[in-house]
């Protein structure tokens, strides 16, 4: 009963628009009062929740993404993607997807993708003859790759919550991210053939070389960051600092970032990171209270009473995460759901690495679904198109992403193969 009240309270307060950090704090306070727990312990758990070296990587990756956007690296990425796939039926739709895949390796953020690449992609697609709502839909849908392809801020946060390797999580997200791009490409191709959308001429070898040369140094960013983590050269936090320095140097060398821009970028980063870390702190005290009340154990027993099959549990994870993603962004959703889902999955023998990828992927789909859908609304604002029309155009892409989530959930090799290749366990 306590579990139902806690979950119902969280959902009700979130739906009426209360910020998720205050939702968790309110529910934790209610449990503390009802259980007569010491308030000092609550404060100690909040402080301990963010007293983690790995969490220093979060504001660093946020800052790196903002520097990449401010440095207009997106123009070079879009040109490179166009040189490779613009000749395929649906031309710029595939350029859109490939550009998002490449940029996600630099930013690890769907919002950075939608805000940075969105305007360039939608403008180019409209100019080429694509419908505005379709251009906005594929732009929003492809931005979902951002939190899955390494480096990823949600993966860093999940690693801290689940006590798993960040390097393994980054590698585990690579294949699903590529699969997402392929499925979105198939959907875009089918729609483009049916609507007779235009293609572009094939790039010459000289144009390919020129585009690659222009994007060469930005392309090294994910190689440096992910490679340094995977091969044990640096910790995730140190790699995040390298990403910041590298992004800043690129912006200064290309003369696309002025020193006068830095205070604004730093303030935006501080605000966004402060919100994220405050949520982490409230999750810590909330997790303490529900663990004290044995709510995760109650949830496990309730699920076990229905079925003891890992397949059923994975179906439950997908359904709950898709629903949760409709009402909140991936990071808050991940912070709320992990204390419940992780013990349940562990009891079923589900690998926590695979669980993390499935949870982040399904939550990220919510970025393009109403009523919250932050990437959906960002792109609609950029494209100046009706949200309803874009939602209709998004449906085939949402289905494609859900298919990928199901494949990742029921084919563990898609997430675990690459970490096993590098780490052998």
Image: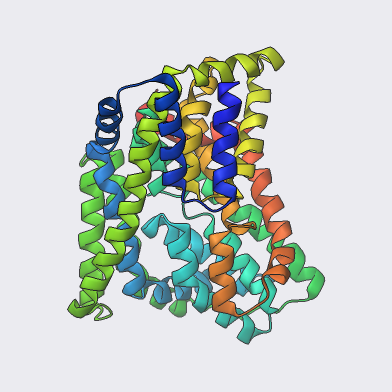
Residue 33 to residue 230: above or below: above
In the picture as drawn, the residue positioned furthest to the bottom comes out as: 127
Colour scheme employed for the rendering of this structure: rainbow
Residue 190 to residue 239: above or below: below
* Residue at the image position 76 percent from the left and 66 percent from the top: 191
| Side of 305 where 48 appears, left or right | left
* Residue at the image position 39 percent from the left and 78 percent from the top: 210
Q: Is residue 346 visible?
A: no
- The quadrant of the picture occupied by the C terminus is top left
The foreground one among 256 and 302 is 302
Q: Quadrant of residue 250?
A: bottom left
Q: Quadrant of residue 368?
A: bottom right
In the picture as drawn, the residue positioned furthest to the left comes out as: 259
* Residue at the image position 73 percent from the left and 71 percent from the top: 389
Q: Residue 313 in the image: x percent, y percent?
A: 63, 25
- The quadrant of the picture occupied by the N terminus is top right
The foreground one among 386 and 206 is 386
Q: Is residue 44 visible?
A: yes
The foreground one among 10 and 315 is 10
């Amino acid at each position: 009963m306590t579990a139902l009240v806690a979950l119902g309270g969280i959902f009700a307060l979130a739906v009426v628009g209360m910020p998720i950090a205050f939702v968790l704090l309110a529910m934790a306070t209610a449990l503390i009062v009802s259980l007569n727990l010491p308030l000092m312990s609550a404060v100690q758990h909040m402080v301990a929740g963010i007293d983690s070296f790995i969490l220093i990587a979060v504001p660093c990756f946020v800052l790196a993404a903002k520097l990449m956007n401010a440095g207009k690296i997106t123009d070079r990425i879009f040109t490179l993607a166009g040189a490779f796939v613009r000749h395929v039926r649906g031309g710029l739709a595939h350029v859109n997807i490939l550009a998002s895949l490449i940029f996600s390796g630099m930013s690890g953020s769907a919002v950075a993708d939608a805000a940075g690449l969105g305007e360039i992609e939608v403008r180019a697609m409209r100019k080429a003859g694509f419908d505005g709502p379709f251009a906005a839909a594929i732009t929003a849908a492809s931005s979902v790759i951002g939190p899955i392809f390494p480096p990823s801020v949600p993966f860093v946060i999940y690693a801290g919550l689940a006590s798993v390797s960040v390097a393994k999580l980054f590698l585990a997200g690579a294949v699903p991210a590529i699969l997402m791009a392929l499925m979105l490409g198939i959907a875009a191709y089918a729609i483009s053939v049916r609507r007779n959308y235009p293609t572009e001429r094939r790039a010459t070898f000289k144009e390919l070389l020129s585009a690659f040369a222009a994007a060469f140094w930005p392309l090294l960013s994910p190689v440096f960051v992910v490679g340094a983590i995977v091969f044990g050269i640096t910790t995730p936090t140190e790699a995040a600092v390298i990403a910041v320095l590298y992004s800043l140097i690129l912006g200064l060398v290309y003369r696309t970032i002025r020193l006068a821009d830095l205070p604004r970028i730093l303030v935006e980063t501080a605000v966004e990171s402060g919100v994220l870390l405050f949520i982490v702190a409230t999750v810590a005290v909330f997790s303490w209270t529900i663990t004290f009340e044995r709510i995760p154990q109650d949830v496990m027993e309730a699920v076990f009473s229905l079925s003891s099959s890992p397949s059923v549990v994975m179906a439950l994870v997908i359904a709950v995460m898709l629903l949760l993603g409709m009402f909140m962004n991936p990071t808050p959703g991940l912070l709320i759901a992990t204390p419940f889902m992780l013990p349940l999955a562990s009891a079923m023998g589900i690998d926590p690495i695979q669980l993390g990828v499935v949870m982040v992927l399904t939550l990220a789909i919510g970025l393009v679904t109403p009523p919250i859908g932050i990437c959906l609304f960002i792109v609609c604002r950029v494209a100046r198109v009706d949200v309803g029309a874009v939602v209709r155009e998004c449906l085939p892409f949402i289905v494609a992403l859900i298919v990928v989530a199901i494949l990742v959930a029921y084919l563990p090799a898609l997430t675990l193969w690459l970490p096993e290749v590098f780490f052998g366990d």
